[in-house]
């Protein structure tokens, strides 16, 4: 997976994501830890078996939030853009919500937009 593919639409670095790493390494202990965090974050029960993510730009599975609740992936695909940094509405309200829990995504996208 190259760096372009490892940067999600919203600016998250897939290679730094515990769900991606746990899936890639088939690490059940890390999947359990991710499931516990996601259960608290999403206020719904998430099992370790729900933690499968190959990155939102892959044809493989994504995390439960990214696959079922995130509005960013479908928006970028509809606009045919690689990341939100290419969008004329950058940063939209949905993206600002991502930045609240992941400020490094904002840093990455801001750098992409400037280049």
Image (cartoon, helix red, strand yellow):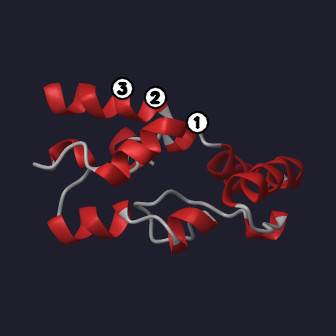
Rendering coords of residue 14 (x, y %): 52, 44
Foreground disc of the pair 1, 2: 2
* Residue 46 higher or lower than 2, as above or below: below
Within 10 Å of the Cα at label 1, are there few (<14), some (14-19), or many (20+) other Cα atoms? few
Q: For the residues marked 1 and 2, what is the alpha-carbon distance in whole angstroms?
A: 11 Å
Is residue 50 something one can see in this rendering? Answer: yes
Do the CB atoms of the residues marked 2 and 3 lie less than 8 Å apart? yes
Q: For the residues marked 2 and 3, what is the alpha-carbon distance in whole angstroms?
A: 5 Å
* Residue 6 higher or lower than 114, as above or below: below
Q: Which residue is mark 3?
A: 107
Mark number, residue 53: none
Within 10 Å of the Cα at label 3, are there few (<14), some (14-19), or many (20+) other Cα atoms? some
Mark number, residue 104: 2
Nearest the eye: 79 or 55: 79
Within 10 Å of the Cα at label 2, are there few (<14), some (14-19), or many (20+) other Cα atoms? some
Do the CB atoms of the residues marked 1 and 3 lie less than 8 Å apart? no
Q: For the residues marked 1 and 3, what is the alpha-carbon distance in whole angstroms?
A: 14 Å
Rendering coords of residue 77 (x, y %): 25, 68
Do the CB atoms of the residues marked 1 and 2 lie less than 8 Å apart? yes
Q: Secondary structure at mark 2?
A: helix
Name the residue rendered at 57%, 64% in the picture.
Answer: 65
Rendering coords of residue 66 (x, y %): 52, 63
Q: Which residue is mark 1?
A: 16
Is residue 115 something one can see in this rendering? Answer: no
Viewed as shown, does residue 41 lie left or right of 16?
A: right
């Amino acid at each position: 997976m190259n760096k372009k593919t490892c940067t999600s639409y919203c600016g998250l670095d897939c290679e730094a994501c515990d769900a991606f790493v746990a899936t890639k390494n088939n690490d059940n202990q890390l999947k359990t830890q991710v499931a516990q965090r996601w259960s608290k974050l999403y206020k719904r029960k998430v099992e370790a078996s729900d933690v499968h993510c190959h990155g939102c730009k892959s044809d493989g599975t994504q995390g439960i939030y990214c696959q079922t609740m995130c509005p960013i992936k479908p928006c970028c695909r509809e606009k045919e853009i690689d990341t939100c940094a290419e969008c004329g509405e950058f940063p939209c309200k949905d993206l600002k919500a991502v930045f609240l829990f992941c400020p490094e995504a904002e840093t990455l996208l801001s750098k992409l937009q400037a280049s």
